[in-house]
Each structure stands twice: as C-alpha cells, then as structure tokens.
C-alpha cells in the first residue's frame, strides 16, 4: 500500500516502483477480507451480543486511529503549518472521510477507515450465528445498494469503495467455511 501511494501520488512517473505500486488494491481487499473473516470466526466461537461487539471492536479500531489522527493533525499544524477547519477535524475524528485527496486531506488513504467502520457498525445488526452465510450476502447487498445511490457526499471516494465492497463479505463467507470445517474436524477427532 505504501509503495502504491508513493508510486502514484508522490512522483510524476507512474512507472516508479512498478509493479509494487499496483498492489494497493489487493492490500485493501486483504485487510477487508481478514476483518470479515476474523469477525465471523470470533462470533461463531463466543457468545455474541450487539453491545459487547461494539464495545470491544469499535474501541480496538478507534483507539489507534485517534492516536494516529491526532499526531497527523499536530504535525500538520506545527510542522507543515497547515490548519484544518474544526468541522473537518470533528468529521475526521468520527471516521468519516468523503474524499481521498492527497493534497488536501489529512491523510488520503483514510477513506478506507470510513468503509471498515461502516462494516463494523453493520455487522452485529445483520449477523446470524445460525446463518452466517446469509449475513455475508445481506452485508454485500446493503453495501452494494448504498453505493448505487451515488450520494454526492461520497462522490470523492465512491470509486474506491465500489472496487472493494466484496472483500469483507467474502471474508465473512471464508470465516464461516473455515470455522465449519474446524468444527467438523474436531467432532471427527473425538
């Protein structure tokens, strides 16, 4: 991912760091896939409740995010002498990034955080231990439906999000399949 952002945004020759520079999309998909996989595998093994899910998982996402973002804002202000509006800072701290502009946003790759937060907010509302594969389909359909609305507010990141909306649900399916296989193997070994 780092090589892609260097190869496409920090140099004028897009062949710089090729082919490493074209792998960023795969990295985003891997993060999303592993998130979906891990959430399903964990939810199938443990007791699952919506409040405990949000408390545990959102805190894990937001804590390092807030620390990094505050450091970015402080460095931007004190070192680069770039200031951001109060509304932009608040929106950023909530995890809402509607653009991915390397020259104007605090950190253009943070568009990804908005997508992953969306999945984490949606996951416990639609997840079913009995039918996790249906949960994956429902999450995909909801995400696909939202991306088809072409909301003006998301126009700065809609192409990025459209390219990656299948990775999380596929990760959920893989988490279900692997967990199911693990349960079958455990039963057979007893």
Image: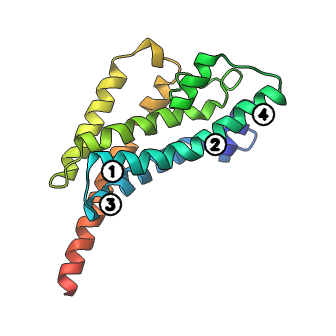
List x then y, in percent, for residue 130: 15, 55
> Is mark 2 in CB contact (under 8 Å) with mark 3?
no
| Residue corresponding to mark 2 | 67
| Residue corresponding to mark 1 | 52
Residue 11 seen in the figure: no
Quarter in which the C terminus is drawn: bottom left
How many marks are shown on the rendered structure? Answer: 4
- Residue visible at 18% across and 80% down in the picture: 187
For marks 3 and 1, give the CA distance. 16 Å
Crowding around mark 1 (Cα neighbors within 10 Å: few <14, some 14 to 19, many 20+) is few
Quarter in which the N terminus is drawn: top right
Quick one: 115 or 1, which is closer to the camera?
A: 115
> Is mark 3 in CB contact (under 8 Å) with mark 4?
no
Q: Where residue 75 is drawn, which disc sits there?
A: 4
For marks 3 and 4, give the CA distance. 38 Å
For marks 4 and 2, give the CA distance. 12 Å
Quick one: 151 or 125, which is closer to the camera?
A: 125
Q: Is 80 placed left or right of 140 in the picture?
A: right
Q: Is 129 placed left or right of 85 in the picture?
A: left
List x then y, in percent, for residue 46: 28, 63
> Is mark 4 in CB contact (under 8 Å) with mark 2?
no
For marks 4 and 1, give the CA distance. 35 Å
The disc, 2 or 3, on the residue closer to the chain's N-terminal end is 3
Q: Residue furthest top?
A: 152
Crowding around mark 2 (Cα neighbors within 10 Å: few <14, some 14 to 19, many 20+) is few
Q: Is 170 placed left or right of 100 in the picture?
A: left
The disc, 4 or 1, on the residue closer to the chain's N-terminal end is 1
Disc 4 is placed on an element classified as: helix
Crowding around mark 3 (Cα neighbors within 10 Å: few <14, some 14 to 19, many 20+) is many
Image vertical order of residue 146 relative to residue 135, above or below: above
| Residue corresponding to mark 3 | 41
């Amino acid at each position: 991912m780092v090589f892609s952002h260097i190869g496409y945004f920090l140099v004028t020759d897009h062949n710089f760091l090729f082919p490493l520079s074209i792998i960023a999309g795969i990295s985003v998909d891997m993060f999303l896939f592993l998130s979906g996989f891990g959430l399903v595998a964990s939810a199938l093994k443990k007791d699952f409740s919506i409040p405990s899910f949000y408390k545990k998982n959102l805190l894990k996402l937001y804590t390092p995010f807030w620390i990094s973002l505050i450091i970015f804002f402080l460095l931007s202000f004190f070192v680069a002498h770039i200031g951001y509006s109060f509304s932009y800072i608040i929106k950023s701290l909530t995890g809402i990034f509607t653009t991915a502009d390397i020259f104007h946003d605090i950190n253009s790759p943070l568009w990804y955080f908005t997508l992953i937060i969306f999945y984490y907010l949606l996951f416990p509302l639609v997840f079913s231990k009995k039918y996790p594969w249906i949960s994956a389909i429902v999450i995909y359909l909801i995400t696909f439906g939202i991306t088809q609305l072409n909301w003006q507010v998301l126009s700065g990141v809609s192409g990025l999000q459209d390219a990656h909306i299948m990775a999380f649900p596929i990760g959920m399916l893989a988490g279900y399949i692997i967990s199911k296989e693990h349960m079958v193997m455990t039963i057979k070994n007893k």
